[in-house]
Amino acid sequence: MPKQKSNNTKKDLQINIIRKQLDTIVLTFLREQPMYGYELMTKIQKTFGIHFGPSTIYPFLAQLEKNGLVKSKWNIEEKRPRKNYHITTKGQETLTATADTINLLYQKTYTNTTTDEE
């Protein structure tokens, strides 16, 4: 069955961009403080109004860990054991490089466009 075309293209665009920048978002949140997967899901939903479920977040965190961008540690001191994620040095460096690239992209495209129109 073909997907229904959405009338809300701005929201679709936002979801698509957020999905593609999920690594940047997660690393930014983990730079602020270590978090559990559920905390990340909740913070993403509160911040952007988009829900990423466990079947998206946990494999994504596993891939970030495999790539050396985050590390996890089991916290067994609570009622229920939970895996706590934190950003690594490599993750911090990646986040900085990503921010620099996004800023450069913005400067080279947006500022040149607005200058040309004036």
Image (spheres, rainbow, N blue to C red):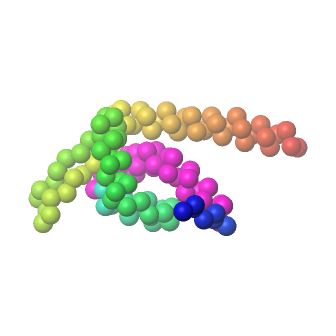
19 sits left or right of 4 in the view: left
Q: Do we see residue 105 in this rendering? A: yes
x, y percent for residue 14: 59, 56
In the rendered image, the residue lying farthest to the front is 1
Where is 77 relative to 28, above or below?
below
Count of numbered marks: 0
Viewer-closest of 86 and 8: 8
Q: Quadrant of the C terminus?
A: top right
Q: Quadrant of residue 115?
A: top right
Compared to residue 53, the image places residue 23 above or below, namely above
Percent of width and height locating residue 39: 33, 60
Residue beneath the point at 34% across and 57% down: 55
**Which of 51 and 81 lies nearest the eye of the viewer?**
51
Q: Residue at x 34, y 37 (%)?
A: 69
Task: Pinpoint residue 94: horizontal percent, then vertical percent.
Answer: 43, 34
Is residue 70 visible to the viewer in this orientation of the structure? Answer: no
For this rendering, which residue is in front, 99 or 50? 50
Q: Which secondary structure class fits the magenta region best?
A: helix
Choose top left, top right, bottom left or bottom right for residue 67. top left
Direction from residue 1 to residue 91 in the image, left or right:
left
Residue at 47% in and 36% down: 96
Residue 33 is covered by the magenta coloring:
yes
Start and end of the magenta stretch? 8-36
Q: Is residue 62 magenta?
A: no
- 102 above or below 37? above
Q: Indicate whether 49 appears above or below 99.
A: below
